[in-house]
Amino acid sequence: MGLGTYFRLARAGFVLAREGAFSLAEGQPIPPSAKALVSVARLIEKRDVRKTGRVTRLANALNRLGPTYVKLGQMLATRRDIVGGSVADDLARLQDAMPPFDPSLVPGLLEEALGEKARALKDVSPPIAAASIAQVHRATLVHPDGQEETVAVKLLRPGIEARFKSDLAGLYALARAAERIVPGAKRFRGRYIVDTLARSAALEMDLRMEASAISEMADNTKDDPGFAVPVVHWGQTARAVLTTSWIDAIPVRDVARIDAAGLSRPELARALVRNFLRHAIRDGFFHADMHPGNLFADPTTGNIVAVDLGITGRIGRREQRFLAEILYGFITRNYRRIAELHIEIGYVPETHSIADFAQALRAIGEPLVGRGADEISMARVLGQLLDVTELFDMEARPELVLLQKNMVLVEGTARLLDPQFNMWEAAEPIVSEWVRRAVGPLGQAEIVRDEVRALLGAVRRLPEIAARAEGVLGDIEADHHIAKVRDPLLVALGWGGLIVLGLAGFAILAWLLG
């Protein structure tokens, strides 16, 4: 690492110490030397942190440290198993907003990214929104036939990739040092967290990936009522530039304009929630940053229009089924079915009692009975569910936590539109339809199809498995001690062991792909 990286790490340490980040080390199994360093760092904490003994403005500290740390905080907000519930809640309030960069750089950046195609963009406005990685401008796109269209142009911040690379190098160094100095730190899987951050940042800093996400969402939702996304202009889209149709609509937070336009806020709230659930349960692909700033109400069509798909989430078939049946179980108060599902899918070990787990789930669901619409929070129920499952040895499922985090945003926006909005009532038709379809002939046929595909995939890999087994056998025969063994029974057992291992690997592979 260069001196600049060390300087940035030192500054980050100072800012985090001031905001109380080192209070997280309290109660952790760290060696005396590390405890002494933590004690020194905590001497510069702000007074309110020292009084309460917890992080009060960690999100603000990360915003001050810049885009890499903002993204790290957003990712850690989905990992309650690592940072704990209170810190995750604090991080969930991170606002990804930064001052815009110099507008005089925009023409050069467009030409560098698009070449001659940049000439089709004119009248580029000052930035209308600026986040940690990119900012958005309004512009006019001149089509080859001379027609003009108002578009939104998203531009990466200059130098952002180099900044991330430098900051990530420092975070990797910290993770390695922590694992060497504090043995207990290995359970936090620091290097894995930085790996995840690096992959996420690499995707988010290639705006073609966001364009692809918008295109996929458009295909998935083309026949869905009440929801739309912008249209991508691929000719003026590149790694550092994304051009889409301009959304001439009303921000959902501007309820006065929505009322003046004659739109029904309860209907908009219903459309938002139902479409989010369709995306997650039906498609397994959802917008993972649906805060009010990314959602608009179209006064012409009455649709909810979602923008900024830089962060999306995916869940597999098992998780889609899990989510649908979990929500259906709470709607119908079938707590035993929820408990059985956790064990069937393998989230909770079979060593736990279904009856005990169902009892814990009942403690979550029953307080909802008879409550007012404004008191029934689906997001809170899912959060409680994730907390309870930890008691039953369920491993953290980051994709489910990301889904639950986004459900908090969706639910909050729905309540902004309609304070009396009932999430469960709105969700019931979507969830029930999916469950009926899943247990019907079509759903069973899809399960069989997936199993056959998994089996065929495993069969295609048999030659590779056999080649690896042959290589292992060659290594065994080359070993001096094993080469002296001539007992036919041992040789037979060796071959038998390889065959068993091969079959076991085949079975595990088929199960994983299923």
Image (cartoon, rainbow, N blue to C red):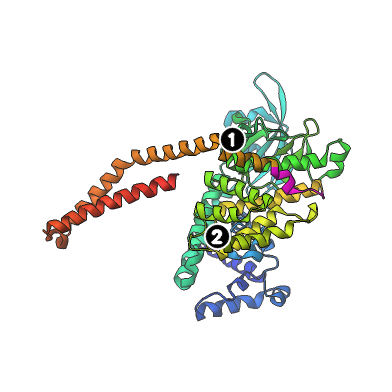
Amino acid under disc 2: Ile
Vertical arrangement, residue 360 with respect to residue 324, above or below: below
Query: Is residue 154 shown in magenta?
Result: no
Camera-side residue of 326 and 401: 326
Relative image position of residue 70 (x, y in whole percent):
63, 56
The structure residue drawn at horizontal position 63% and vertical position 67%, both measured from the top left corner, is 16
Circle 1 sits on which residue? 216
Magenta: main secondary structure: helix
Circle 2 sits on which residue? 354
Alpha-carbon neighbours of circle 2 within 10 Å: few (<14), some, or many (≥20)? Answer: many
Q: Is residue 91 left or right of residue 113?
A: right
Q: In this rendering, which labeled residue sits more in front, label 1 or label 2?
A: 2
The structure residue drawn at horizontal position 78% and vertical position 36%, both measured from the top left corner, is 249
Element type where label 2 sits in the image: helix
Q: Which residues are magenta?
A: 419-428
The structure residue drawn at horizontal position 77% and vertical position 43%, both measured from the top left corner, is 269
Element type where label 1 sits in the image: helix
Camera-side residue of 5 and 262: 262
